[in-house]
Structures are given as structure tokens and as C-alpha cells.
């Protein structure tokens, strides 16, 4: 919601700047989201001064130009070339000295510079109206009739005002602050605690009475008192509908409300001033001045001011004349009865509508207006008459009109203020400190909460109507805290906080989200597949005990007859679907569950499964295409485990690669055979990494450790070993660590080979060893010594030999 600082000061005695009010507003729950400076005109006439033309003569080199001597205070004059036909000696003019930034009505702002015009020096500019944003007149310079001294600021002569628009994030419960007066009232309560007493200015308006010789008939019949507890109206005649005066236009424009005419603008001005919506009806469309407030039949057609024909609901409340509806109560006026240029007499309405009824109609019709914003949150029934008196007074002043009827105020069952029992001891218990009875009483006075405290233990409070959010004792105590400052509450030593919720150190959702972001950043796409699958599509059933399968008893079809025991099957279906549609280069991942029956108990296991197939990138002018391979799967698993700070060792077998930590399998990389892929009609290599998310979650380490970046370079050496096919990659890692733990920082397996070029029962591992010393640069002799020891140990303990 937008609040004008200058408008706010109409109701608030303060010299505190808009920036200074910002933290105060935020502290009382009216959070300031932004403050924007606005100017009445561009530049606010800054730098312009009053000057006098001391001499004026024709320019020797231009017939239409004049050379003037300008005095802007002091004894010296300066030369200025001027092209205005009306410039003359002795005139008081608006002058822009060198260095002034002028803002024309049309076009961009520009700086006045010293120049030569047709050979003559010019040190400033005598201004026309359109050159400084004061209109569109360019027939001549502005000539002022004033006795003010030369050098006087033009901005002060034109009373240029700079305003600040304070954008407040108004919460739905604070309808009391949905106006400038409401914000001022709340600020005044807070400022009283800061020793700024009597900050709130009293509302000033005249009690209107009929002052016309004629009496216009006016009667109101409210047929649904529940939806309209109060309705007041008055007739105003001899109105001249015209544009609003500048002061009213500027007020409304400052908060983004478009000026319509003087009558409509007054209703909008009062709404944003006091928070009381109002409506004006053309009296000529109200036969005999009879108004009926009622519900109409469902599907009755009604055209609103926006020229939209709407079907009404039986719960909608309408303001009607004797023949038809004129206004959707609390929401929107009708197209026929509104104020136009031909209007001379109006009925001015001010009412209180039930919030729930307005909210329901607003939702059903999809209408959101300034009026509905306030009515559906709860307006103040006690503001109905003050707003009507003030608006009628303003309309009479601006349109030279007269009051032509007595005020009709239908209020058959006056609403009673909410009564709340307040216990000072309960306030002390909830707040933690004793504010003191005097502080409490003063706060209630500033909040306009009346109280009876004859019983010192239990006070009887009456809450003003405008505080719709204060409904119970806890709300009253919150008000005491809000106004006196939450920052004043100091924790007592030993104050227990065991009731506060404890949040787990590790959160699965957060960890899953972080891993997802890492994978997406690496070019992966997330998929979500069905947990149900077709049993016949299980090509690798030998990996699972048939008794572990979970079948669906009331299955919809054979294709959805079993809960998946592995993530791989449904993932391969996604790969096949994409590959068959020429999308062959894929990097996918999925978080999901698998389902098992073990020892007659059903179990669910969480997984993260990564799928890769096709090329990392295709042929381009720089390089040839590169296919995704087993090494890429190893890299992704290592990356995720490293991010989780889990130390796991890969164990390579013919079927898969397992990552094991302290005897627990954390992940598997599957080498899928052609027989498996054939079941899914996939004819290209697929690499699948299946991470057991539950096991990883148990071992994840969220504590961060830091170490200095190594100052000395690392060195890499490759080694190709031929070993027995029964020897695992883990055996090689163990020997490497045992051989040189200090210098070997990483061992990476980048190729595995079994084929015709090797003896039967043999395989070849290609390894990269990364060496680094944190204290000094490694020399060739040290590196060679480490590699020689590695080769010797591999040969001795594993019977390996080096493949050249």
C-alpha cells in the first residue's frame, strides 16, 4: 500500500523525515518495502533563480536574437543571448545560471553551459515555461511581477513540494492501517513512547446541515441488516462537475490514483485519507430518491462501470433504486448511475458492509477494488458519518453545491465494541517482564482502547471498531509489545527455552535439493517415473530374490502389477522412449523408492539413480564427438560422495562397481549387457549408477573443514598394470596407500581392458596417480622413487607386470 509522506503529515505532527519514519513503521508491524522520492514537476525547479534584465539590445549578427545583461543578485551582471520576442529591459525573469540542470516539459533534461552564440558570449538561459516543465507555452519567456530580491529561489516562489511515497507491505489483518489517518494514528501511538506526545492531529470537518431552499426526497430501505448493518446518505444539489483542483489531483496522483472529476476525486480522497469507501449516485437515476439495499434473484444481469455484464449471485448485496440495481455493494458501481459531466445532483453514500459478504462477492466475481480491499478486511462503522460529513463539505466547497436533504442514517442495531478481559499478570508471564501499570494504561490510551481497572487483577477492555485484529487477551498483550518495542524484552538468565522446536541437523529434503542442483549444473535432467511396473520387463531378475518382489493384489492391469524392486527398469523405459525419438544423448537422474518383501515385512528404500548414454558432445569444428563411458559414471558417484564428505572405496567386479564404506555398500555402477538393453530395444551403451540414498544420508558429514590451498604443484603419472582377473581395484588402492600415503593424493582408474591381446584370466588396469607435497616442489628423483616403489610392490604382492 502506498502512503504519501506529505499527506501523512496532514494528520501527524512530526519533523521526522520519511527515511526516519521507516524503521518506526517497520517496528510496529507496518513493514516499509521502499521509499520513492517524487517531484511535483521534473527537477522541482532546482537551481533556477529570480533575475532582472538590466540591459537589452539587438544581437549584431542575428535579427531575432537579443543580448541582455542579467543581474541575479550582487553588483555584477552577466551577458546572456536570448531569442524570446518579449524580452525587455527591467523585467523580472526566471534564470538558469551555468551548471543548472533544466527539465523541459518534453524531451530530456540538459545542463546549461557557457557558450558563444553567433559570436557573442552567453552565460545562462532566460527561461520560457516549457523549458522548465511549467507547461507547454513557448511564445516567450516568463515575466514575473514580484518585489522579491534578485537571486531568490524560483522553487520557493512556485511552492514546489517534494514528496516521498512510502510503500508498506500491509498484512491482511491490519485493516486499521489501510489509510493515511490509520497509519498516522498507529505512528502516533508509537511516537508517544519516544516522547513525541500529541503527534496525532484531530480530524477537522464541519457537521453538515441542509442549506438549500428546496428539500430533495431521500429514503433508504435496508432489507438485509446482516450484510449491511449501517447505511448513511445525503443529497447534494447544484453541483458543477469539473476537473479537480491541482492540490487534489496531486494528492491522488502521488499514490497512483487517476483523477476523474471533482466529485469522484473527493470520494477517493476521503477513502485514502480515512479508510472509508464512499459512492456517489446521479440523483436523476434514483426515482423519488428511494434507495433499496437488498439481495436480488440469482443470474440477474448487472453491468458494472467497466462495461462488463455480470450474472449476480443470490448472496450478492446490491444498492438499488425502485427499478434496477445501481451498485454492487462494497465492490463496484453500475454503469448507469455514476457521476457524469451532466450530473447536477447526487446522493452521496457512506456505509458499513459485513466483511464476509463483500469478500464472498469479490471472490465470486473476481473483482478487486480499493473499496473491496477495505470492506472485506473490516472497515470502521464509527467512521461512516465523519467521512460523509467531510466528503459532503469538500464537494460543496469544490463545486459550489448545497446540501439538499437531511442525512439519512440507517443503523437499527448499533454494533458494540469488543470486550476483552485483560490480566496484567498474564501479560508479565507471556512477555517475560513487568511493563508497569502506568506504561500499560498509557499504551491503551494511545491505542484508543478503553479500560476499567477497578479490579487490579482483571481489567475490562473495550477495543475500538477499527482494530478488527484484536480479538483476545493474547492480541492485547501483543499490542503492548508492538508499541513499546520488542527490543526492550531482555532474556532473563536461566530462562528456559525447552519448548522451542528442535530442527534436525540433517534434513533429507535439503540434501536431496543440493545434490539435484549439483547434477543439474552438470547438464543432467531430473525425471520422475512410475513406481509400478510390468513383471515381464524384469530382464535382470537374477539380481533379486523372487520372494522380495511386492505384487499389487488389485492391479489395474498386468503392466502395473508389481512395485519396482529396482530403479533401473523404469529409468530404462524413459531412455528407450527418448532414443526412439532421436534424442540419443542423455544424462538423467531420479530420486525414488524401491519396494521389497523381506521376512514377511514390506520395506521401502530411497535411491538416487543416474543414467548416461550417447555422447558427451557431438562433432564440432574444434573436436570430434566423445562418448559417455564408465569413467564418467565413476566421476559422478565420486563427486556426490565427496560432496557428502563420505570416504568410500570402489570395488570392481565383472557385473558392477561397488562403492563401500566400512562394510556398507553405498552405490553401484551397473555395466548393463546387451541382453538387458535388448529387452528395452536399446542399441547403444547405457551406464547406470545407483546410489543408496538412505545409507548415504546416515553417513553424510555436514561439518565443514578448511585447509590452506597447496602452494606447490601436483604431478600426475600413469601406470598400466596387467593383473589376475580376480584382483580388485580396491587391492590396488590398498597397496598404493601402504606404499606412499603422504605424497599420493589421488588414484584414478581410467581404463579397464580384457581381450585377445592378454592371456586368459588376465586383465589390464590403467591408473593415474596424483602426487603432491605440501612443503616443497616435487623433484623428478622423488617422483621416480615413488613410482618405482609402487611398481615393485604391485609385482611382489599381486604378481602384476607393467604393460608398455
Image: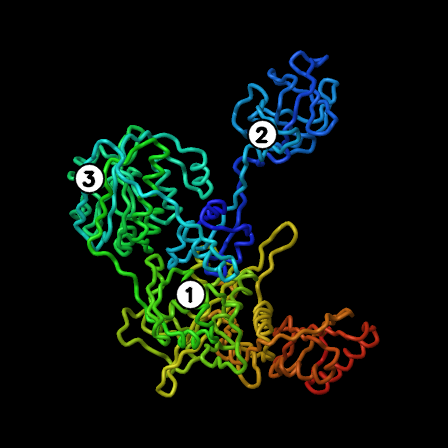
Left or right of 550? Residue 111 is right
Q: Which mark is residue 218?
A: 3
Pointer 1: what residue? Answer: 479
Q: Is residue 563 left or right of residue 131?
A: left
The residue sitting at 66% across, 17% down in the picture is: 89
Callout 3 secondary element: loop
206 and 303: which is toward the camera: 206
Image quadrant in which you'd find residue 713? bottom right
- The vertical placement of 459 against 393, above or below, is below
Mark positioned earlier in the residue sequence (2 or 1) = 2
Q: Give x and y (percent) for residue 280.
A: 29, 39
Identify the image quadrant of the C terminus.
bottom right
Task: Write down the quadrant of residue 537 in the picture.
Answer: bottom left
Closest to the camera, between mark 2 and mark 1, is 1
Q: Nearer the viewer, residue 659 or 592?
A: 592
* Residue 379 percent across, percent down from the top left: 32, 53
Considering depth in this image, is 14 or 229 the residue closer to the camera?
14
The tag earlier along the polypeptide, 2 or 3, is 2
Badge 2: residue crowd in 10 Å (few <14, some 14–19, many ≥20):
many
Total numbered badges shown on the rendered structure: 3
- How far apart marks 3 and 1 lie (CA) works out to 43 Å
Measured Cα–Cα span from mark 2 to mark 1: 49 Å
Q: Is residue 113 above or below residue 689?
A: above
At mark 2, the secondary structure is loop
Amino acid at each position: 500500500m502506498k502512503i504519501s509522506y506529505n499527506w501523512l503529515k496532514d494528520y501527524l505532527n512530526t519533523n521526522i523525515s520519511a527515511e526516519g519514519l521507516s524503521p518506526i513503521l517497520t517496528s510496529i508491524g507496518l513493514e516499509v518495502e521502499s521509499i520513492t522520492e517524487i517531484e511535483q514537476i521534473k527537477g522541482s525547479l532546482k537551481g533556477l533563480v529570480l533575475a532582472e534584465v538590466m540591459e537589452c539590445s539587438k544581437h549584431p549578427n542575428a535579427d531575432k536574437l537579443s543580448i541582455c545583461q542579467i543581474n541575479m543578485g550582487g553588483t555584477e551582471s552577466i551577458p546572456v543571448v536570448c531569442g524570446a520576442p518579449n524580452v525587455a529591459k527591467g523585467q523580472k525573469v526566471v534564470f538558469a545560471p551555468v551548471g543548472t540542470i533544466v527539465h523541459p516539459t518534453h524531451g530530456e533534461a540538459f545542463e546549461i553551459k557557457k557558450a558563444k552564440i553567433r559570436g557573442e558570449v552567453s552565460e545562462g538561459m532566460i527561461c520560457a515555461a516549457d523549458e522548465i516543465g511549467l507547461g507547454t507555452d513557448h511564445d516567450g519567456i516568463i515575466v514575473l511581477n514580484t518585489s522579491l530580491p534578485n537571486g531568490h529561489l524560483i522553487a520557493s516562489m512556485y511552492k514546489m513540494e517534494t514528496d516521498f511515497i512510502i510503500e508498506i507491505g500491509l498484512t491482511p489483518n491490519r485493516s486499521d492501517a489501510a489509510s493515511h489517518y490509520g497509519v498516522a494514528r498507529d505512528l502516533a501511538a508509537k511516537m508517544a513512547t519516544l516522547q513525541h506526545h500529541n503527534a496525532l492531529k484531530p480530524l477537522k470537518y464541519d457537521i453538515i446541515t441542509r442549506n438549500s431552499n428546496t428539500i430533495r426526497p431521500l429514503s433508504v430501505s435496508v432489507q438485509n441488516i446482516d450484510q449491511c448493518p449501517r447505511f448513511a446518505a445525503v443529497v447534494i444539489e447544484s453541483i458543477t462537475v469539473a476537473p479537480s483542483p491541482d492540490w487534489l489531483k496531486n494528492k491522488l496522483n502521488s499514490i497512483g490514483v487517476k483523477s476523474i472529476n471533482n466529485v469522484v476525486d473527493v470520494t477517493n480522497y476521503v477513502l485514502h485519507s480515512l479508510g472509508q469507501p464512499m459512492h456517489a449516485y446521479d440523483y436523476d437515476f434514483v426515482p423519488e430518491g428511494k434507495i433499496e439495499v437488498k439481495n436480488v434473484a440469482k443470474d440477474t444481469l448487472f453491468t458494472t462501470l467497466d462495461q462488463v455484464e455480470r450474472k449476480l449471485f443470490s448472496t450478492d448485496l446490491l444498492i438499488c433504486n425502485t427499478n434496477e440495481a445501481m451498485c454492487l455493494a462494497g465492490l463496484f458501481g453500475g454503469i448507469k448511475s455514476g457521476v457524469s459531466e451532466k450530473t447536477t445532483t447526487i446522493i452521496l453514500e457512506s456505509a458499513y458492509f459485513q466483511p464476509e459478504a463483500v469478500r464472498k462477492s469479490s471472490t465470486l466475481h473476481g473483482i478487486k477494488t480499493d473499496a473491496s480491499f477495505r470492506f472485506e478486511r473490516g472497515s470502521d462503522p464509527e467512521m461512516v458519518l465523519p467521512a460523509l460529513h467531510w466528503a459532503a463539505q469538500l464537494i460543496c466547497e469544490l463545486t459550489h453545491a448545497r446540501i439538499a436533504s437531511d442525512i439519512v442514517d440507517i443503523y437499527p442495531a448499533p454494533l458494540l465494541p469488543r470486550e476483552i478481559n485483560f490480566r496484567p499478570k498474564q501479560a508479565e508471564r507471556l512477555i517475560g517482564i513487568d511493563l508497569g501499570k502506568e506504561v500499560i494504561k498509557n499504551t491503551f490510551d494511545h491505542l484508543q482502547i478503553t479500560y476499567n481497572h477497578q479490579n487490579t487483577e482483571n481489567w475490562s477492555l473495550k477495543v475500538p471498531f477499527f482494530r478488527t485484529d484484536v480479538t483476545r487477551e493474547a492480541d492485547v498483550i501483543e499490542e503492548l509489545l508492538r508499541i513499546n518495542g520488542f527490543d526492550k524484552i531482555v532474556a532473563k538468565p536461566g530462562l528456559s527455552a525447552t519448548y522451542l522446536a528442535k530442527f534436525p541437523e540433517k534434513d533429507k529434503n535439503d540434501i536431496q535439493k543440493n545434490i539435484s542442483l549439483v547434477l543439474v549444473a552438470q547438464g543432467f535432467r531430473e525425471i520422475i517415473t512410475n513406481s509400478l511396473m510390468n513383471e515381464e520387463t524384469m530382464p535382470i531378475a537374477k539380481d533379486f530374490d523372487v520372494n522380495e518382489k511386492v505384487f499389487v493384489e488389485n492391479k489395474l492391469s498386468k503392466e502395473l502389477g508389481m512395485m519396482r524392486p529396482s530403479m533401473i527398469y523404469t529409468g530404462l523405459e524413459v531412455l528407450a522412449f527418448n532414443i526412439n525419438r532421436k534424442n540419443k544423448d542423455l544424462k538423467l537422474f531420479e530420486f525414488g523408492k524401491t519396494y521389497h518383501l523381506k521376512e514377511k515385512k514390506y520395506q521401502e528404500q530411497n535411491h538416487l539413480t543416474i543414467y548416461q548414454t550417447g555422447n558427451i558432445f557431438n562433432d564440432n569444428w574444434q573436436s570430434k564427438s566423445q562418448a559417455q563411458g564408465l569413467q564418467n559414471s565413476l566421476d559422478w558417484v565420486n563427486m556426490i560422495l565427496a560432496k557428502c564428505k563420505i570416504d568410500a572405496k570402489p570395488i570392481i567386479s565383472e557385473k558392477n562397481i561397488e562403492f563401500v564404506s566400512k562394510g556398507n555398500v553405498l552405490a553401484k555402477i551397473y555395466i548393463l549387457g546387451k541382453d538387458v538393453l535388448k529387452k528395452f530395444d536399446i542399441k547403444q551403451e547405457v551406464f547406470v549408477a545407483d546410489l543408496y540414498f538412505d545409507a548415504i544420508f546416515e553417513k553424510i558429514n555436514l561439518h565443514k573443514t578448511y585447509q590452506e590451498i597447496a602452494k606447490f604443484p601436483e604431478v600426475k603419472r600413469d601406470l598400466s598394470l596387467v593383473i589376475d582377473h580376480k584382483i580388485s581395484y580396491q587391492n590396488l588402492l590398498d597397496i598404493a596407500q601402504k606404499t606412499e600415503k603422504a605424497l599420493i593424493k589421488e588414484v584414478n582408474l581410467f581404463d579397464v581392458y580384457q581381450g585377445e591381446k592378454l592371456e586368459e584370466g588376465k586383465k589390464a588396469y590403467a591408473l593415474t596417480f596424483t602426487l603432491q607435497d605440501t612443503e616443497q616442489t616435487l623433484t623428478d628423483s622423488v617422483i621416480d622413487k615413488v613410482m618405482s616403489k609402487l611398481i615393485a610392490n604391485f609385482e611382489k604382492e599381486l604378481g602384476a607386470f607393467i604393460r608398455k
